[in-house]
Amino acid sequence: MAREFKNGSVICQSGQPIQSLNMIAKGTVRAVYPGTEFFLGKGDIIGLCALQPGSYIFTYIASDDVTIATFPYKEGKLTSLLSQKPDFAQLIVKSGLKQMKHIIEAYELSKYDCDSLYHYLLDSYQEYAAFCGRYSISPRLLPALETITPLALEEDIPQWLIDLYENMSPILLPALSHSKAPVLDFVNGLMMSISQTAHHIMSVCHIMHEYKSDISRLLMNENRLDLFDLYISLFKRIGHDKDDSTAVTAAFSRMMLHLESIGSIDHTLYETRVREYRELSAALEANGLEMAQEQKASAPASNNLNGSLDTILDYADCDEETKAAFRRQVEEYRRQIDKNATDDPSRKLRLNLTKSFYQIYQGAFRASLKDSDIPTVLKMFFQFGYVDEELAGKENAAYLYSIAENFPSSPENNVYTAYEWLKAIHDGKKEPSRNEFDADYTAYIHELKTTGKITAQKEREMATDCSEKVLFELTNMFPLVNKITFGRLTTFCPVFSEHNVLKDLEKTFVTAEKTNKALSEIRALDFGAYYRETIYSNPEKGIAKENVNVEILPDIILMPNIGIRGVMWQEIEGKRRTTPARIMLSVFQMEDLMSIIARLTGEFRWEMCKRVQGARWNDLSEPSLTSEYFDYIQFYRKNNSLTPEAKDKIKAAMQKAKNNYKEMFVRDYVTWILFEGAGSPRLNKVARNIIFTYCPFSKAAREKLKSNPLYKEILDRYDVRNAQKLHHMDNLYQKLQKTGTPIPDEIAVQRRFLES
């Protein structure tokens, strides 16, 4: 049977079950896979690479007007088809080997690109750092650069397999044409082997495509934390008046040409960023931007910031030796051109400066407890880690000064600065956080007693001593989380330094309004994200026991750094499940805040489920979010509901997540919130079903998704289950109303939860 396809039409879609072999009678067809494509022409047969998986690996698109001859095919029945059309055997082998040649070429090219991109990234950053050194400017660190390593494939393609298929055609095809023996079983086995090998190679190609995408994002991305932006920030600093700035311009021009040729960089994004650069270049040439920056930097606040380090040291309740050491370290750090240097003296300086910083912070905090009018410079120190105007940059220091007095936090709405959080602990309003060993303050002092470091009497005293509690927080959670939220662990230093400012501070400043907005947007989709199930009992009103849900929003603490990460530090306080989680963010967040809070919400979902399930968190006999997701990832290779392409994506994702099941779930959850919630399906069927079961969308979101057939089955199943729960609630309402009993608030809240 012949079928016609117009130019651009999709002939077969990746993941679609194979039901026929399609021979190209006329025209050209493009075979597309993420990061790879090749062309098939007259006589080639679509579907040969999909015989063993049973579904198409590639998407096949007509490159011009195409005519296809279709031959019905059932899985495992190639021999039957060949017995009806013996002459078809040689054509199948020829096309299969040709396609294998294309696939091997794609694999080898992709592997070369991975190596080339990796070295280009490193060389380009080193060139940028060299330019910074030439102008005595501290180079800014490229986030995630330290995590990028050369490509390492766990299951690479052996060279002998490549050699086998590359040399098979000239040997095998002549032999088949002259063979008088039956070849059908041989051809069937060969094609099954080809399709299996093709699938294996393309799964490796998928991993390499992800690797190239990761490197490409460091070169250029929507968040602007990229090498392209580092060069732009360098231009802003040096302008066009330097004698040898043409060398920087030339290097940047070469970089733009290279980026344009990288397929994994979005072309529209590239055009936008290049246009912005050209506008900036024109402004710099006219000296307009430099004049504006000079005017902004000369704000009146600068007069109040002279001698900031002296002000901080005079205020802090510390010994003179500690103060003198901190002063020396800050001055040495200020003089250092490359503040991200990894040589031993530089690392030692950062370590010593970090240790001194927290000693000064503790001393200043102690002094502030007796002060009703804390100086603005000290507020900048507490809230931002600011210590020196020159180190921070005058423009940045002036901005910090302008926001320090009226910091837009909101402790009454669970959003704290680091200082406000420590003050809340000192005032007995909050308990200290767990330490890095997951022990809370009570467990910590009990351990001191059991090891003989303190007496039972001292344990009782410390249990209520708020000064000791603050000290526990300052020496445990505070330094560790400050480093983690900063994100670049090997170059961390807690003092505010201009070289860490990768974006405009005003745009990255995290406020209570911004965090609450992000949380509200997430809760508008995942309405049950921060609800906890608990038991309500009121025998006096005839309610023996009811499972109800209560919403407990997290405490959010803004750490004094310029960072790229967030931390979900603990899901509850102590043992009680109806206590707030603790989320820590950088006060200046370089990454997208919505994405970070979505990620932390996913972490909370996972950890809270593990807390509830206990030791059986991965036991499928007790269905839960963690047990079902764990089972899905553990046995995905055997899951018939997943297409070969979906399995390839899981394999690649597991490699990126370092085989961490929680990390896998969190990535899927972020996709769930940012894409699926907007009606853009990205997850596979199995992952979507699990996440929807335990993290269902709100009623408004469900209504929008009803028209999408991908969601029909899970929406119908949810409606049935929820209707049963609402029916039970209706019966309870009727029972209470018959006896004239007012509806308890807990029951009313539960009904609204079920109607959400």
Image (tube, rainbow, N blue to C red):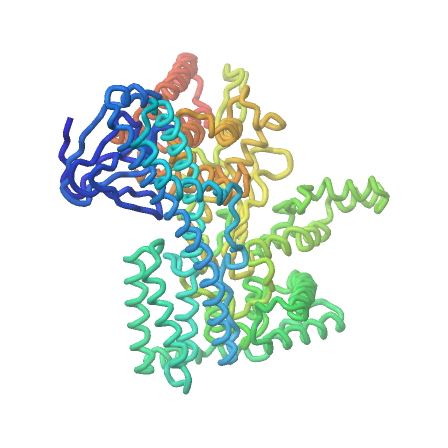
Q: Is residue 718 above or below residue 466?
A: above
Q: Between residue 113 and residue 182, name the one nearer to us.
A: 182
Q: Is residue 499 above or below residue 668?
A: below
For the C terminus, give its image quadrant.
top left
Residue 211 locus on image (x, y percent): 45, 50
Asked whether the viewer can see residue 695, the reply is yes
Q: Quadrant of residue 170?
A: top left
Image point (63%, 73%), residue name: 330
Residue 143 locus on image (x, y percent): 49, 59
Q: Between residue 272 and residue 643, name the one nearer to us.
A: 643
Image point (26%, 39%), residue name: 60
Asked whether the viewer can see residue 513, the reply is no
Residue 43 locus on image (x, y percent): 22, 37
Q: Residue furthest bottom?
A: 243
Left or right, 273 with respect to 470, comes to left
Residue 76 locus on image (x, y percent): 35, 21
Q: Between residue 456 and residue 448, name the one nearer to us.
A: 448
Image point (37%, 80%), residue name: 290
Q: Between residue 357 and residue 84, name the one nearer to us.
A: 84
Q: Quadrant of residue 383?
A: bottom right
Q: Quadrant of residue 360?
A: bottom right
Image point (41%, 61%), residue name: 219
Left or right, 753 with respect to 367, comes to left
Q: Is residue 227 above or below residue 715?
A: below
For the N terminus, give its image quadrant.
top left
- How many marks are shown on the rendered structure? 0
